[in-house]
Image (cartoon, rainbow, N blue to C red):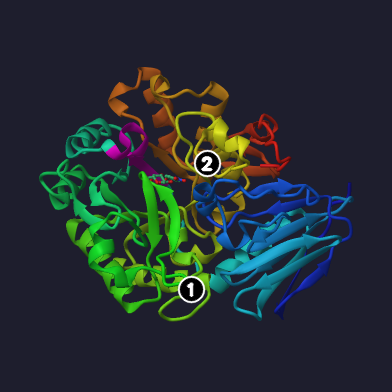
């Protein structure tokens, strides 16, 4: 088949409509880090996830009940000849849907710039990534090597566990030791709990004295319903039309609420939280559940959800300073470009393949290596624009229920993105496992993209397509 030449143009429009011809395949880009992403048949209906709690954290709430496919920020239609047509918003809040033979764009902020490109899939995505960088900004790209406490300790993380981790990373080329969820008193109450008796500053000192950057997890725009914050500072909460707090999801055994990122009070609160973490000595912040700051509601300063999000995260960048590494997680992807250094590009890998109950309800944003590899491997075009975090790779076979092919694909995602993360207790690795980790940490691999899900890493070909093919389809007929 002849290779279609690349054509690119920009239009300023409220509802750009572009005739593709028959759309055989459609690239659906998920709203936030964990939202399903990848190629779908546009004819296949989307069925809403029946569980409301799961639905809330899964994708854009404005589209949670849709029965037809649409895409966040950018959509691509591929016709029968293999030519790709991309329609992409050059603003944080675009939506693209395939309607018969056409791609149609819309945006909450009305008239915005749109990119229209035709060519190969790689060609049009490359053009979109570069135009997005020009419109929303770019941060310097880096290679990241991070140890994170999540999968070996979950919320049971302690000061001692972090001290042990600092010892265990010795001899490995890890740059960041990051404390994940579990250090705080409650989601919303960002003070250390009793498992961190010496306090966060002392712990950051130990990490820094070992020659590493200290990293900390925070979820700045949510509060669990039983947090002190909810009782003491109710004015920070985003409200719905009836004045009730907006529930952004259910986790940690109950609902959690969105804070209103447009309110000066929330911005001051977040400013203080970030300034405090910086003063403790943390130069790497993993900011999680950020999608909650882009939920619709009755904002103190009325604005569209993505504009509200942008106001909130810009306040965070200002408080953190330019030299702090900000990793966005559970974050609206396009709206995060230019503010964050890195972003999680898929759901949590977890130490297992999938949660069958979630798959059965058609929720492909849930934890599990299968969902994580599918979504992250379909978002690798972002890697020229922002550091892309595919979540961790595992080396300790005794801690996971995953086969070698899966472990290999996770390592390959780390090599391709240059974002090498692990949560393993490194003191438990065998010699072989330790060598495997060191090989991945050693130096930057030579990476070439061959086609769609096929990559070449230091001359070796890897193809993530096997993960998608092995996916069981949901009863709804929805494609993951
Ligand atoms: C800490 C974790 C880790 C992890 C993040 C994020 O749908 N859910 O209920 C849901 C819960 C947790 C979660 C994602 C989704 O994980 O991705 O790396 O930091 O929070 O709680």
Q: Is ligand 1 less than 8 Å from the beta carbon at label 1?
A: no
Q: In the figure, is residue 277 to the left or right of 69?
A: left
Which element carries disc 2, helix, strand or loop?
loop
Q: Is residue 359 left or right of residue 308?
A: right
Q: Is 298 placed above or below 354 here?
A: below
Determine if residue 143 is in view. Answer: yes
Residue 37 percent location from the top left of the image: 63, 49
The disc placed on residue 366 is: 2
The circle on residue 98 is none
| Dot 2 and dot 1 residues touching (CB under 8 Å) | no
Given residues 28 and 265, the one toward you in this image is: 265
Residue at the extreme front of the image, as rendered = 242
What residue did someone put label 1 on?
A: 241
Q: Measured along the vertical axis of the image, is residue 185 above or below residue 413?
A: below
Over which residues does the magenta segment extend? Answer: 144-155
Task: Decide: few, some or many residues near mark 1? Use Cα within 10 Å; few <14, some 14-19, many ≥20.
Answer: few
Assess mark 2: CB under 8 A from ligand 1? yes
Of tags 2 and 1, which is closer to the observer? 1
Q: Is residue 440 left or right of residue 459?
A: left
SS at badge 1: loop
Q: Quadrant of ligand 1?
A: top left
């Amino acid at each position: 088949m002849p290779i279609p030449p690349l054509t690119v143009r920009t239009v300023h429009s409220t509802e750009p409509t572009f005739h593709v011809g028959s759309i055989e395949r459609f690239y659906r880009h998920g709203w936030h880090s964990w939202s399903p992403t990848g190629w779908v048949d546009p004819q296949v209906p989307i069925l809403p996830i029946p569980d409301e709690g799961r639905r809330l954290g899964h994708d854009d709430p404005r589209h949670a009940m849709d029965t037809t496919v649409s895409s966040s920020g950018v959509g691509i239609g591929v016709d029968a000849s293999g030519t790709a047509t991309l329609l992409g918003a050059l603003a944080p809040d675009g939506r693209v849907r395939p309607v018969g033979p056409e791609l149609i764009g819309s945006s909450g902020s009305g008239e915005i710039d749109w990119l229209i490109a035709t060519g190969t899939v790689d060609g049009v995505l490359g053009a979109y990534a570069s135009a997005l960088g020009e419109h929303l900004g770019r941060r310097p790209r880096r290679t990241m090597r991070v140890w994170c406490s999540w999968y070996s300790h979950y919320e049971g993380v302690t000061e001692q566990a972090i001290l042990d981790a600092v010892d265990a990373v010795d001899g490995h080329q890890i740059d960041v030791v990051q404390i994940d969820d579990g250090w705080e008193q409650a989601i919303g109450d960002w003070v250390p709990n009793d498992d961190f008796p010496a306090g966060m500053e002392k712990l950051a000192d130990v990490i820094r004295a070992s020659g590493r950057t200290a990293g900390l997890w925070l979820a700045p725009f949510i509060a669990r319903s039983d947090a002190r914050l909810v009782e003491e500072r109710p004015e920070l909460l985003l409200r719905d039309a009836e004045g009730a707090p907006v529930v952004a999801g259910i986790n940690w055994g109950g609902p959690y609420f969105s804070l209103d990122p447009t309110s000066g009070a929330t911005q001051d609160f977040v400013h203080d939280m970030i300034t405090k973490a910086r003063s403790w000595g943390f130069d790497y912040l993993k900011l999680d559940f950020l999608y909650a700051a882009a939920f619709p509601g009755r904002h103190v300063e009325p604005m569209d959800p993505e504009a509200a999000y942008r106001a909130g995260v810009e306040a965070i960048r200002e408080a953190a300073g330019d030299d702090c590494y900000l990793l966005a997680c559970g974050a609206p992807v396009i709206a995060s470009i230019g503010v964050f250094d890195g972003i999680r590009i898929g759901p949590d890998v977890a130490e297992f393949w999938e949660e069958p109950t979630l798959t059965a309800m058609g929720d492909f944003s849930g934890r599990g290596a299968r969902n994580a590899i599918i979504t992250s491997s379909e978002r690798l075009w972002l890697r020229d624009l922002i550091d892309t975090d595919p979540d961790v790779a595992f080396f300790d076979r005794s801690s996971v229920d995953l086969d070698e092919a899966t472990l290999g694909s996770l390592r390959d995602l780390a090599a391709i993105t240059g974002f090498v993360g692990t949560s393993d207790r490194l003191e438990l690795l065998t010699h072989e496992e330790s060598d495997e980790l060191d090989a991945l940490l050693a130096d930057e691999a030579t990476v070439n993209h061959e086609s769609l899900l096929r990559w070449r890493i230091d001359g070796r070909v890897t193809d993530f397509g096997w993960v998608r093919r092995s996916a069981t389809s949901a009863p709804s007929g929805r494609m993951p």
